[in-house]
Image: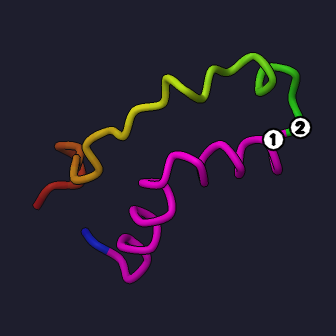
Amino acid sequence: MRTPYDGRHNLLFSRLPMVEALLRGFVHEDWVGHLDFATLERPNSHYVSEELQL
């Protein structure tokens, strides 16, 4: 089931520098400082679990 926000969500999280900025800016946990953002990969953004498929 798609929502009006799916495209915006995919656009936001498809940009790896944005993902890094969001994690560094909003997640104030020690483990964020240990992440290697150079190894980020964009996953298949069109995956839908079996439970959500019609």
Q: Residue furthest bottom?
A: 4
**Residue 42 picture location, percent across and down:** 36, 40
Residue annotated with mark 1:
27
At 81% from the left edge and 23% from the top edge, which residue is drawn? 33
Q: Quadrant of the C terminus?
A: bottom left
Helix, strand or loop at disc 1?
loop
Q: Please tell me whether residue 41 belongs to the stretch shown in magenta.
A: no
The residue stretch that appears in magenta: 3-27
Give the vertical position of 37 relative to 15 (above or below). Answer: above
Q: Please tell me whether residue 13 belongs to the stretch shown in magenta.
A: yes
**Residue 14 picture location, percent across and down:** 42, 54
Q: Residues within 10 Å of mark 2 (few under 14, many from 20)?
A: few
Q: Locate residue 21 relative to residue 16 in the image: left or right.
A: right
Give the vertical position of 17 relative to 39 (above or below). Answer: below
**Residue 1 picture location, percent across and down:** 25, 68
Q: Residue furthest front?
A: 38
Residue type at numbered disc 2: His
Q: Locate residue 27 relative to residue 43 in the image: left or right.
A: right
Disc sitting over residue 28 in the figure: 2
Taking depth in this image into account, of 2 and 22 the one nearest to the observer is 22
Q: What secondary structure is the magenta-colored segment mainly?
A: helix
Taking depth in this image into account, of 31 and 39 the one nearest to the observer is 39
Residue type at numbered disc 1: Val
Q: Residues within 10 Å of mark 1 (few under 14, many from 20)?
A: few
Helix, strand or loop at disc 2?
loop
Label 1, label 2: how far apart the Cα atoms are: 4 Å
At 28% from the left edge and 72% from the top edge, which residue is drawn? 2
Disc sitting over residue 46 in the figure: none
**Residue 8 picture location, percent across and down:** 44, 73
Give the vertical position of 2 relative to 44 (above or below). Answer: below
Residue 37 occupies quadrant? top right
At 89% from the left edge and 37% from the top edge, which residue is drawn? 28
